[in-house]
């Protein structure tokens, strides 16, 4: 059975394992060196109610995670977050990424975020498709901004804006 829940500090080892696998094998992230436990502890400490991390747990094992991180530490960006989504290689293609993405998008809405941005490396058709399917729109392409495994890479910028209820008294 698959459960999606808030991540706790005890999940950090497996979250890191899944992320490090993607660092070493894919261009999905532009990190190139595996993260150390110390780096990951500082990373985890930045999250909370506004910027959540969720994990997908199957039969007691963490098989994927998703997060909404602060887009910028400049205060006016406070209601903007960036999404991340990683599923363990052997569990990909089984619907886990979709469930995590849908759940993290809901968490963002509950947390009062206004918008979520996704940066997706060229060629990552599954991520582009998943993002489109939960309401992200294409807002641009950053050309040749990354170089990994000897190749220059474009990054697709996608954005979801939450529909917010009209403020009381503002009926225009
Ligand atoms: C991207 C990732 C998170 C997706 O998770 P997943 O569990 O494999 O994805 P799911 O099985 O939930 O969904 C895959 C969907 O993409 C579709 N799909 C599969 N291959 C596809 C392709 N080449 N092009 C378009 N859609 C594709 C599937 O049909 C499915 O659609 P559906 O939900 O409508 O049936 C996962 O593959 C992953 O961790 N990849 C490496 C890291 C990464 O790329 N992270 C994202 C960084 S932006």
Image (cartoon, helix red, strand yellow):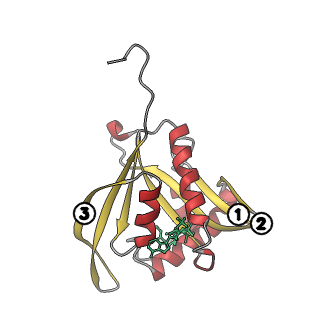
The CA distance from mark 1 to mark 2 is 6 Å
Q: Which mark is residue 141?
A: 3
Q: Determine whether 113 is above or below 153 in the image.
A: above
**Quadrant of the rendered structure where residue 90 is?**
bottom right
In the displayed structure image, the side of residue 28 where residue 20 appears, left or right: right
The CA distance from mark 1 to mark 3 is 34 Å
Secondary structure beneath dot 3 equals strand
Q: Residue furthest top?
A: 169
Mark 1 crowdedness (10 Å alpha carbons): few <14, some 14-19, many ≥20:
some
In the displayed structure image, the side of residue 21 where residue 118 appears, left or right: left
Secondary structure beneath dot 2 equals loop
**Quadrant of the rendered structure where residue 143 is?**
bottom left
Q: Residue at x 33, y 41 (%)?
A: 74
In the displayed structure image, the side of residue 40 where residue 1 appears, left or right: right
Q: Residue at x 49, y 35 (%)?
A: 112
Query: Could you tell me residue 91's position as x and y percent?
Result: 63, 75
Q: Which mark is residue 47?
A: none
Reading the image, the residue beneath label 1 is 57
Earlier residue among tags 1 and 3 = 1
Callouts 1 and 2 close, C-beta under 8 Å: yes
């Amino acid at each position: 059975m698959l459960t999606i829940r808030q991540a706790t500090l005890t999940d950090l080892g497996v979250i890191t394992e899944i992320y490090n696998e993607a660092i070493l094998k894919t261009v999905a992230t532009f990190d190139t060196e595996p993260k150390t436990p110390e780096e990951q502890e500082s990373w985890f400490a930045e999250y909370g109610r506004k910027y959540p991390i969720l994990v997908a747990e199957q039969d007691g094992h963490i098989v994927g995670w998703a997060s909404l991180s602060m887009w910028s530490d400049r205060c006016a960006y406070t209601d903007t977050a960036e999404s991340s989504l990683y599923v363990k290689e052997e569990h990909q293609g089984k619907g886990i990424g979709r469930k995590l993405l849908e759940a993290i998008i809901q968490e963002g809405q509950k947390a009062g975020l206004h918008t979520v941005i996704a940066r997706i490396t060229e060629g990552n058709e599954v991520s582009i498709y998943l993002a489109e399917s939960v309401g992200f729109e294409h807002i641009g392409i950053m050309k040749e901004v990354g170089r990994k495994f000897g190749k220059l890479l474009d990054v697709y910028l996608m954005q979801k804006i939450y529909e917010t209820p009209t403020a009381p008294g503002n009926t225009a």
